Image (cartoon, rainbow, N blue to C red):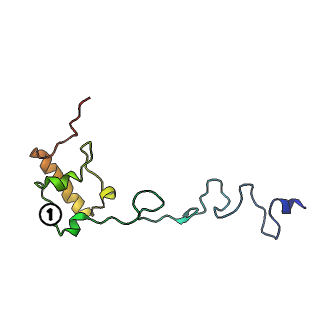
Amino acid sequence: MSDDQRMGGGEGDGPRSRFGGGAQGGRPGGAGGPGGGPRGPRRGGGGGGRGFGRRKVCAFCMDNIDEVDYKDIARLRRHISERGKIEPRRKLGTCAKHQRSVTTAIKRARHVALLPFTSGSTR
């Protein structure tokens, strides 16, 4: 057995690296080229075992709400984290138009003392 056959380079397919040249392109990190990782190019929409598997839809668009009311505290509380921060679009799936409206409504509700500015926990 020659060195070429022992290294897996038999039939004229060139020298192979010691990391193997399978689906990952022979790179030790596993990224297989300019398109992305070993499983192909990365696409949006969640997948890969992390987050949600399907696209999120805007709750305000579903309910045909044009402007978010600052007095609707129950709806606004869903858009505030435990620490009192406004949740980002990518987490709740709100569209850009309604996210701007939600932000303004939360700030107005805080100003009139309907919502807290912080979580209220003390050290």
Instruction: Answer with left or right where residue 45 lies relative to residue 35.
Output: left
Residue at 58% over, 62% down: 38
x, y percent for residue 37: 56, 61
Q: Quadrant of the N terminus?
A: bottom right
The residue lying furthest to the top in this view is 123
Question: At 22% from the left edge and 58% from the top edge, which residue is drawn?
Answer: 100
87 versus 97 height, above or below: above
Q: Residue furthest right?
A: 1
For disc 1, the marked residue is 67
CA neighbours of label 1 inside 10 A, class few (<14), some (14 to 19), many (20+): few
Between 44 and 53, the one nearer to me in the picture = 53
Q: Residue at x 42, y 64 (%)?
A: 44
Q: Residue at x 24, y 64 (%)?
A: 59
As displayed, is residue 103 above or below residue 45?
above
- Quarter occupied by the C terminus: top left
Residue 105 higher or lower than 44, as above or below: above
The image quarter containing residue 40 is bottom right
From the top left corner, tell me how far across and down residue 114 is, in percent: 11, 46
Viewer can see residue 104: no
Amino acid at circle 1: Glu
Q: Is residue 13 left or right of residue 42?
A: right
Would residue 107 be visible to someone looking at this image?
Answer: yes
Residue 73, x across and y down, in percent: 14, 52
Secondary structure at badge 1 equals loop
Q: How many numbered marks are there?
A: 1
Which of the 4 image quarters holds residue 46? bottom left
Estimate the x, y position of residue 81 in percent, counting from the top left.
Answer: 27, 47
